[in-house]
Image (tube, coloured by chain):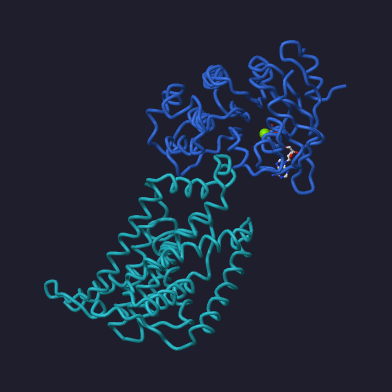
Amino acid sequence: MDWVNVIVQGTLLGGLYALFAAGLSLIFGVMRLVNIAHGDLIIFAAYLGLTVVMTTGLHPILALVFVIPAMALIGYALQVGILNHTLGDDLLPPLLVTFGLSVIIQNSLLEIYTADPQKMDAGVLETASFSLGDLQLGVLPVLTFGIAVVVIASLQWLFYRTALGRAFRAVSDDQDIAQLMGLNRRHIFGLAMALALAVTAIAGILLGIRTSFDPSVGGGRLIFGFEAVIIGGLGNLWGTLAGGVILGVAQTIGAKIDPGWQILAGHVAFLLVLAIRPQGLFPRISG
Amino acid sequence: MADPLLQISKLDAYYNDFQALYQLDMSLGEGEVLAIIGSNGAGKTTLMRSISGLISNNSSQMRYRGNPIGALRADQVAALGIALVPEGRQLFPSLSVEENLLIGGRLGRKGPWSLRTVFNLFPILKERRTLPSTSLSGGQQQMVAIGRALMSNPDLILFDEISLGLAPVIIKSIYDALPNIVGEGISAMIVEQDISKAISVSNRVYCLQEGRISLEGASKSISREEISHAYFGIT
Ligand SMILES: Nc1ncnc2c1ncn2[C@@H]1O[C@H](COP(=O)(O)OP(=O)(O)OP(=O)(O)O)[C@@H](O)[C@H]1O
Ligand SMILES: [Mg+2]
């Protein structure tokens, strides 16, 4: 029973990792952009949530009403104002620019919020739990996993069932030909980044309720998100959820064996998948 | 003659340092069908890409309904009602047949073309509408590419080698559909390697050679000798 519990807890943790990863997966899929600042943007969203909570007294979950649109706007502006200018045949400029962005975000957060760890207070939500058979499940992890499933399903629906999703896929297939359809790729890229950072807002708030954070922890979230994307297979959203779950389960199993092994076990699982199936477990499928 | 629909004047086009078009002058009247012929590498595709905005030129080198469009982006040109059926079809592989058509119509310009009328023109596409575009035969893919361009209800449609790599019977069926397309009052520019085909469907013909116009004339009156002279540069 102990092990079942470990696997269930790991699966729920995987929901959070899938939320870290979904935005990365989306922008890589649409514009082949690897966003090194993604983790710092998650932390930025958490601080934004913290500020909203402190100034309005809202519950952190309700703060999403402000943080999601704010992050989406920032995403559009960031893409159209800066990142679009770095895109081309060469992969290096966007890497360098987003790396620079990562440094800027971290240092700005340090300036504004200092290096002290912060946490959002979600009241009973943090400790509430219920039992399912012999299992004791926390409400927050279950809620997080449920949100991750809803987010992935919504993105999947948007990608394959709406005109905007069609535009995303067309631009991803061939930017020139997509322009011939009257699609301005700069605008479409802006919308993709807006969507990615809207998801990042959710990830940031849930992270900030679950654990304490400080300006330096973005890099780790980037790695987890990145590993989930690669394990699941590039360009496959449900694969990204599966990747998050595999990473989460590997980490909790590692932690069960020895608490110091949590992070290491996740990396080992990632490397194993990479060695056995470099294209990921579920490479791009459509529909 | 009234103002031409499209007026190209002293058009130069470059790929980095390489100049592909030199001082091209060309005009296309409302409702006119132009054929563009020329050997491999003459610059036909470059001309199509310049008109549609995939290659950026000087603003005044191209006028559409009197307005300079040479420096516009491709999506802006498309919004004005110029559609390109690109060489090699270039469908979106991750979109189904129907989605390829729908995205062609996303500009929402008014006109005769819709999913229904495109399916009437090419009934086979209706049967295949849910399939990935890449699963179709070459001829069917070409029909999708033409339908996708028509879906924007263009006033000017550019065809770049729509018969390339297709079996003769398929080519015939595609060209048989052409009068239904230009009959709707749209103007067209047709790049075609098959000279007799090019001449039979067009009002006027331009021959390109090494980035320059080597011959221009009414399709009815132009002679075989003139063409082979212009085509191969035999003097
Ligand atoms: N992307 C490119 N970069 C550099 N040079 C190019 C590029 N595309 C075409 N060219 C050159 O420009 C010239 C004109 O090419 P273009 O494709 O317009 O010819 P074309 O008449 O369409 O030929 P084809 O009948 O083979 O399609 C050729 O010399 C070609 O080598
Ligand atoms: Mg060509």
Is residue B171 shown above or below A119? above
Name chain B's colour.
Answer: blue
Q: Is residue B96 left or right of residue B145?
A: left
Q: Nearer the viewer, residue B45 or B105?
A: B105
Residue positioned most to the right: B235
Q: Is residue B32 left or right of residue A6?
A: right
At 50% from the left and 36% from the top, the residue drawn is B104
| Residue A101 position within the rendered picture, expressed as x and y whole percent measured from the top left | 57, 72
Residue positioned most to the top: B221
| Residue B67 position within the rendered picture, expressed as x and y whole percent measured from the top left | 70, 35
Q: Nearer the viewer, residue A257 or A222?
A: A222
Q: Quadrant of the N terminus of chain B?
A: top right
Which quarter of the picture shows residue A15? bottom left
- Where's ligand 2: which quadrant? top right
Q: Nearer the viewer, residue A36 or A233?
A: A36
Name chain A's colour.
Answer: cyan
Q: Nearer the viewer, residue B3 or A155?
A: B3
